Image (cartoon, rainbow, N blue to C red):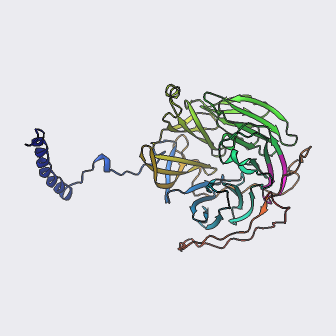
Amino acid sequence: MIPHHRPYLLTTALLALAVVPAFAQEQRLGEPRYDKADTQVPQYVLSTCTALAPAITEIVLPGTGMAVSPDGQFRVTWVHTPGGAELTLLNRDTQDQHHIALPAPVLSPGVAWRVLEARFSRDSHLLAIRSVGQIWVADAAAATLLYSISVDKDKQLWPGSFTWSDKFLGVTFWPPESVLADAPVKTPVIFDMYEATSGAGTHALPLDLASSDAWLEPALSPDASQIAVLERARTWPGSARLLLLDVATGKVKWEKKISAEDIAWSADGSQILALGSRLMWLSSKDGRKMRESASDAGSSEYQRIKFNEQAGIAVASFSLYSSFHRLFSKHPQAQPLIVLWNLKSGEELCRKAPEASSSFDPWVTTRGEIVALEETYSVRPPLRLLESARIVTYKIVLPGGKQATPVNSQPPAPAPTSTSPENAEPAPAVQPPPAQSAQPQQQTPAETPNPPPEPAISPPAQPPNTAPVPPPRA
């Protein structure tokens, strides 16, 4: 006996057979019809932002990492290989590319190696690449590795977060359980300072903190005389601990509780920018809030800031959540949010809530542009699978429709780096025990099976004027 619902199914099938040929004929003879599910329209994350205009798009391999120099001249991308990682350093003015191979160091069983981040120095001359257990420093113009900072095997201290000043590189050192996992440190964190170009250790400063590397944000002042440390709150609700220390003496100048997740120094060292639900400007003298952004982003436990004072733009990334849902769940569903602020006025220029299937990593340059790595994911709860990636260059459009600076314009001449009296660093009054110097690094050429014919890949040069330094930490 045929079930009572079968006639409906048979009728539907016959109707479908009658409609499909007609639809196919319409596609052949007339204008094609597209269903919403199979419509593919290129959509940039910030394409609807009136303050930006998408200018250049480049497709890259999924899983690519990226960093852009503050002056916009250099861009580094990296992909992981079976033996480590391969960096591609691009001069955006000449389109010259150089490849640098990063061999994965020998780590303890069960520890997965990967490149965590890369950041250029303030003058765009140097590039620091942080990986699990090692930090490399490279010359950006020559695409040459200068030195590396690795694990202190004697004291079992691992390099963690790092920060640039104008002439120094600062690195935090942690017990392995505090940098590989989330165990709060029980001994003072060691903050080592290195001369940026040579890697010579100049300073070792103990920091009395009760945190782990993932919850800490160190920031050296431009002249390297002070260090601001943000110890993020580990519980919700809670406030972060922000303190300012004198590098020469190690004494705390001031300390305050603050609702913020990220900090950065202004170029003149007079202010500290702190990002919470609003962007705040704090006085470096006493931590007093001088002003804040006009708009509020809302409740968020993830807040990151990228800005460039010459471009006059700050890009903030948030992960918003519902305060009501947060009371009943430790892991509420979060909504990404991107906010652009005018640094001079604090006014909001743009606000965009990207889809959960996309990610956005911006870099603001002095050329009046934002270079962003945008990724697209296939979301199949609980999975989030990476599908594609692209690099998008946005021109910053000023009020009135004028562009801040042409994207392909030549960058301004770099600031002088001579050691003349007016450019010399003042010597600190008190010198704590010096940090161990970093290890000079030999360049390891990457093996590229099929290098592109254009542009040509020139061999890396030897480090200029690299003098011998004392033995490294490890």
Q: Along the line of sight, which residue is nearer the eye, 164 or 314?
A: 164
Nearest the camera: 319 or 412?
319
Residue 321 visible somewhere in the drawing: yes
Quarter of the rendering containing residue 245? top right
Viewed as shown, does residue 413 lie left or right of 361? Answer: right
| Residue 404 vertical placement versus 150 (above, below) | above
The residue drawn where x is 71% and y is 71% is 461
Residue 132 percent across, percent down from the top left: 66, 54
Does 196 lie within the magenta span? Answer: yes
Q: Which residues are magenta?
A: 192-204
Residue 176 x/y as whole percent: 71, 49
109 vs 293, nearest the viewer: 109
Does 310 lie within the magenta span?
A: no
Dividing the image into 4 quarters, which one contains the C terminus? bottom right
Q: Is residue 244 above or below residue 124?
A: above
In depth, the one of 212 and 195 nearer the eye is 212
Locate residue 395, reporting x and y percent. Answer: 54, 49
Image position of 57 with respect to 254: above or below: below
Residue 152: percent from the left, percent from the top?
Answer: 78, 54
